[in-house]
Image (spheres, grey):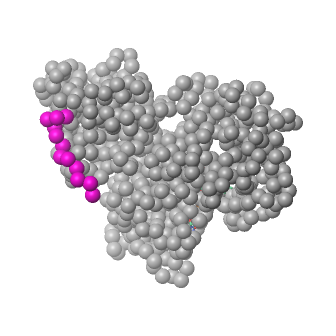
Amino acid sequence: MRLLATYRPTLDLLLTPASPAFLQGCGLPAAWAGQAQWRVLETRFGLGLNFLVTWQAWKSYRQRPRLLHFVSTEACPVNAAELLQAAANHPDLLPLAVQLAKQWHGLLPGFHRLVFEDGHVLLTLGIGDAKTLLKEQTFEADSVCLDGVKPGQNADTSDPHLLKAVARCCRRGTRLVSFATSNSVIDGLTQCGFDVSRKAGIEPQVERLHAYFNPRWEPKKTPASLKPKPRAPARCVVIGAGLAGAACAASLARRGWQVTLLDAHDSAAGGASSLPVGLLAPHMSPDDSLLSRLSRNGLRATWQVAKTQLLAGVDWQASGVLQRRFDASGGLPSDWPEAGEHWSRLANPAELQALDAAIGNATPPTPNSSMPALWHAAGGWIKPKRLVQALLTTPGITPRYGVKVASLKCTTNANPEGAWQVVDEQGNCIAEAELVVLAAGFESGTLTHANLPLQAIRGQVAWGQSTDASALPPFPVNGHGSFVPAFPNDDGQASWLMGATFERDHHHAEIKATDQQDIYQRLQQLLPKTAMSLKPTFDQNQTHAWAGVRCVSPDRLPIVGPLDDVALPGLCVCTALGSRGLSFAVLCGELLAAWLHAEPLPIEKRLAQSLRASRYHFSE
Ligand SMILES: Cc1cc2nc3c(=O)[nH]c(=O)nc-3n(C[C@H](O)[C@H](O)[C@H](O)COP(=O)(O)OP(=O)(O)OC[C@H]3O[C@@H](n4cnc5c(N)ncnc54)[C@H](O)[C@@H]3O)c2cc1C
């Protein structure tokens, strides 16, 4: 392990006046020594200096927590250049600011999870009004920085509703620092249950407040259904080594769980996640639906892993994706802001011209101008298997392949909270753990008594070597089906891929010759000129085929989280990723871990609730 320099408060005190005052006032970094996690809440992100100083202190402190959560809200985010400018005079902070600036994009209203230090420093940034955003979280903060004085923009620190919202996020003993020191702030904090004292400030501040959450009453608890009892990391079995299982295994191992990963195949990503290449593109809807918002959060999470752990141009490419629209669905919201253009926008003339080259003088049906094509700037292609392999390099995961699980048995003898025995087809117990995560795709429902309403949808794609590049679009195109024009296959040769068919209630991944014809017809509709150039390849059966089984839920959203904390303690699920496993898996892994440890949620509570396994599972 790398030796770390100890924290140097005196040096840091010189860096920026406000930020070390926050650390000092909260007793950091000493207070987090030996803790598994530390959760900081800040009510105004501003130029990010508090975050950078806290991150720097975490990096420098030997007895740092395994995970540092920093949750901050901001009504009017600055731009990346301003972040860098603010850190320019702080040599210790500048490299961190550079990392922050790289992830500082697409900041639409709502929460965004920015990930640093291999997932050990997590910034959950809420864009919008602090009071409203804090209602969308369920965690308890260990330290709070109360700031927000920017009239008309950020929250007013003396607003009793803001102070109540902050108090709701505190546990007895949470320490708070405020640079707003008016009597109304002191009164408001006192009424909310804080013991408050004035302290001398560090220049340029004249004074600051230190407060300690210690209400004379028992704080109202969030219902247990919304905030499960946090679990201490122990043994965990994840069943399924596809995208869902790998993502859950990585998120849990990072938090200290000893994860055994079981899969019936001989290697990782043997099921639907063995797809040669898949598309990653935001979902768009005029009302910016739940699915649209989730897809953006998911994309951010997946690209973050790809950018830090995979090879650009070989394993993934953020090429952008052009979406042809054949009907009125999938348009941009009418009030789509500029920040949204990081994700998607109307295609520009150059992109449309490049598309025309792949369409040719095709006969209808072509989209008309009332349904203009979209350019998903944040889209691209990625190889699912490589993503799975990268996730499984997280220390703490022990994979066991060629192991088919037949059933699970709950034993309360070993542990009052419950332990699970994993049983094979011969009735042998092959593993035992306090926590089991079912990530076995469609099979997840058959492994317990959980009545999960899962549907299997078989699908096939065709792929081949790219030859006449002039007839291929220069970027992936989706609409009816999707076409990836150029990705390096396992032999390193440039290949194209066209997908996909949909066969409902079919559980087997066999290849069907008729599906290749179906795929060709889809290509004719999506990109007629490309289809013409690839016709000989299809006619002479020179295409390759791949088939897999998707797993979907009735509302087409993933199913993630504990099934039933009372009847089935320690049994969780992560499945039903549907046709968007690449967008959802990494986010779902983090969401599962957040539920289990009562951590800050990576997305709004409302969105997270819509994915909870308990929405479908009812104990018999
Ligand atoms: C044709 C097609 C095209 C697609 N295109 C895209 C795309 O472009 N973009 C995108 O994001 N997504 C796409 N998808 C969807 C994506 O492939 C899935 O969402 C994703 O792979 C699901 O991952 P998973 O881990 O849930 O399931 P899987 O990858 O299927 O993993 C489940 C694992 O569980 C194991 N398992 C099952 N039962 C048992 C048991 N009893 N014991 C032990 N192990 C068991 C299996 O062996 C398997 O490895 C496509 C899917 C298909 C079929």
Locate residue 401, reporting x and y percent: 51, 72
Locate residue 426, reporting x and y percent: 53, 83
- Left or right of residue 524, residue 310 in this image: left
- Left or right of residue 217, residue 283 in this image: right
Q: Residue at x 57, y 41 (%)?
A: 318
Q: Is residue 146 visible?
A: no
What is the quadrant of the N terminus in the image? bottom left
The magenta stretch spans residue 5: yes
Q: Is residue 351 visible?
A: yes
Locate residue 585, reporting x and y percent: 52, 52
The magenta stretch spans residue 314: no
Query: In which image quadrant can residue 52 be found?
Result: top left
* Depicted 203 relative to depicted 606: above or below: above
Query: In which image quadrant can residue 19 be found?
Result: top left
* Depicted 218 relative to depicted 563: above or below: above
The region drawn magenta spans 1-12
Locate residue 465, reporting x and y percent: 72, 54
The residue positioned farthest toward the top in the image shown: 152
Depth check, front residue: 97 or 37: 97
